[in-house]
Image (cartoon, rainbow, N blue to C red):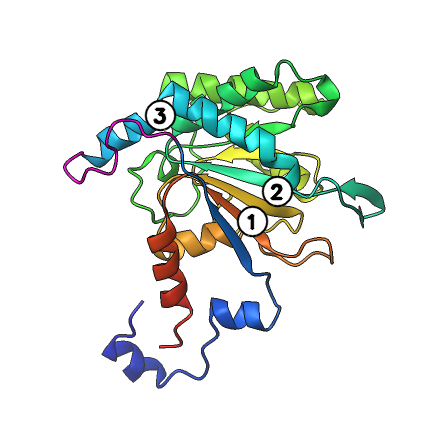
Amino acid sequence: PTRRSSDLQAFGDKLHTYTIVDAITDKNVLPFRIDYVNTIKVGDVVDKQVSAIDTEKALLAVERIRQVVAYTLAHFDQKTKREKSYDLRGARIRGFNALFATASIDAARRYYNHFQVQQEDRPPAQRLKIGLIYSYGANDAADDGILEDEAFDTDALTSDARSFLEDAIQDYNDLFGTSYDTSADKFQNYYKDLSLRLKNRELDLVIVVNMFLTGFDATTLNTLFVDKNLRAHGLIQAYSRTNRILNSVKTYGNIVSFRDLEDETNAALELFGNKD
């Protein structure tokens, strides 16, 4: 944000500025590789006369989601470098893992279902281990591209949204032999366990709305699939989940965007690469 005169009076001139570009140049974080994947058009969703809500509804068309999921599954091993192996805390691990960022709880639920359906024909050993997490508050807000702080309030979810999350957590319990649910304490413990399994590369992909897109660091995470609007610091925060340094196998953070975020990406990098 712009420095106000009151800030200058209270704190004086700034001592030092360190930007995202500086961090990449100094090899403190990895550079980004960004792919923009054209998805099928559902009506004229770029028409400025169409409201944001109508546009989001159009982007949830069954055929579009089916194709996005098919693309993700087809390219997952390549993006997460599953052909490469490395040592992680005494274990031999193949490749990295990913987040899939969606625009709403409704979208997250639809994507989770489509991933389940499209993996049914795969042998169990070849199915991606997929998690789902969302909560009320920031995750259910109108998506303007700015990410808010995480909230853990499941009580305020609609009954449908909470029931769906409960079922997804049961899938997780079946996968890992755990016993989490959406009650307050157990949901927080689910969040912690999900975080740990992401960091240990035990999960392949986690579908989120806003959770895990700010402040969460897993060095094993190298890819972010994006089907939501992002801009400014929200965009930089989300992209930066992928670029934490781990080893020589992980050479950059992968962003795969199913929306045309090129202008927003360039603007954000220009803004947060500017020392002023």
Tell me the chief SS of the magenta region. loop
In the figure, is residue 206 to the left or right of 81?
Answer: left
What residue span does the magenta drawing correspond to?
A: 40-50
Picture disc at residue 79? 2
Q: Does the CB distance between marks 1 and 2 fall below 8 Å?
A: yes
Say whether disc 1 or disc 2 marks the residue closer to the N-terminus.
2
**Element at label 2:** helix
In the figure, is residue 248 to the left or right of 129?
Answer: right
Q: Is residue 242 visible?
A: no
- x, y percent for residue 253: 57, 53
Determine which residue is flagged by label 1.
254
- x, y percent for residue 267: 34, 61
Q: Does the CB distance between marks 3 and 1 fall below 8 Å?
A: no
**Element at label 3:** loop
Q: Nearer the viewer, residue 258 or 104?
A: 258
Using a 10 Å C-alpha cutoff, classify the residue at mark 2 as few (fewer than 14 neighbours), some (14 to 19) or many (20 or more): many
Residue 45 colored magenta? Answer: yes
80 to 109, vertically: above or below: below
Say whether disc 3 or disc 1 marks the residue closer to the N-terminus.
3
Q: Quadrant of residue 83?
A: top right
Using a 10 Å C-alpha cutoff, classify the residue at mark 1 as few (fewer than 14 neighbours), some (14 to 19) or many (20 or more): many
The type of residue carrying mark 2 is Lys
Determine which residue is flagged by label 3.
60
The span from disc 2 to disc 3 (Cα, nearest Å) is 24 Å
Residue at (64, 13) in percent of width and height: 121
Residue at (59, 63) in percent of width and height: 29
In the figure, is residue 30 to the left or right of 136?
Answer: right
Q: Nearer the viewer, residue 60 or 13?
A: 60
The type of residue carrying mark 3 is Leu
- x, y percent for residue 99: 54, 39
